[in-house]
Amino acid sequence: MSIVNPIQRNLKFLLPVDRVTDWHADGVHVSQFLNTLSLFFPQGERFFIDSVRHYRDQIDEPELQASVKAFIAQEAMHGREHQIYNDAMEAAGFPIKSMEDRVTRRLKRLQKVSSPAYCLAVTVALEHLTAIMADALLKSPAALEGAEPRFKALWEWHALEETEHKAVAFDVYQQVVGTGTRAYLLRCATLFMATTIFFSLCTIFYLRILRRSRALINLRGWWSLTRHLWLRPGVFRKALPSWFAWFKPGFHPWQHDNRHHLEQLDELVERVESFGHEQQAA
Ligand SMILES: [Fe+2]
Ligand SMILES: [Fe+2]
């Protein structure tokens, strides 16, 4: 069971849209890689909400009921802020809408042809993927060092809330699909498939965005992305062992107790609220 109860926060990041293509200190390739991840969130999180909401009435524990409510609220807020982020990319001349539509079509098709239990299994798998990348980001101060402060705060907020609610969909899954062999095999298969499909699509979109940025053939840029993901801070390298942990029978997201990251939340909320005050003063 969860050892943390998520809570809803309504934060607005007021992103400086003119910085959207180059807001990360490691340059365009890293900025656009994170921008590519962002374009999946509004539709992806709507899918997560639908998958979990479907089972809401079958949850009897009041604590899990409350966590589901907060999970839905948090994902809705992530979707809202990432939509503003993605719209800024579209306004900067990138065909984000057409890529978002492609994600929507895929997810709608999945909902049409699959059972609610399968959609929930895909959700818990993608929530695991998000949680392990969030953890890798939060334990590496260098991951967002020197980045534009509002973009930095948005990614930190998303990573912190993904950590806070990382077990909610999983607990629902265990309650409604079960903990037996069938439930285990289903969640293993969906992590494998979800990771493959997600990163294939992500690569296609990333290359399109880089081509539009005229940065496709820039070896220095590719090196900075490779270094960022695999060496310093090495977000993917740090997330990899946790990806494999999923395949352990009896796995639960809170077996990796990283709730100490959540101590940053109060300071983060204050920082984000100060953005609003700065804008009012300007
Ligand atoms: Fe999210
Ligand atoms: Fe999430």
Image: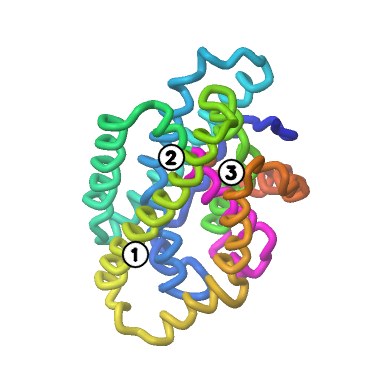
Q: Which residues are magenta?
A: 124-149
Q: CA distance from mark 2 to mark 3?
A: 16 Å
Q: Position of residue 39 (x, y in %)?
A: 36, 51
**What main secondary structure does the magenta stretch of the protein show?**
helix
**Can residue 14 be seen by looking at this rendering?**
yes
Residue 117 percent coordinates (x, y): 43, 28
Look at label 1 and name its amino acid.
Thr
**Residue, disc 1:** 203
**Which image quarter holds the N terminus?**
top right
- The tag on residue 122 is 2
| First along the sequence among labels 1 and 3 | 3
The residue carrying pointer 3 sits among few (fewer than 14), some (14 to 19) or many (20 or more) residues within 10 Å by Cα, namely many
Q: Earlier in the sequence, mark 2 or mark 3?
A: 2
- Quadrant position of residue 150: bottom right
Q: CA distance from mark 2 to mark 1?
A: 20 Å
The residue that label 3 is drawn on is 162
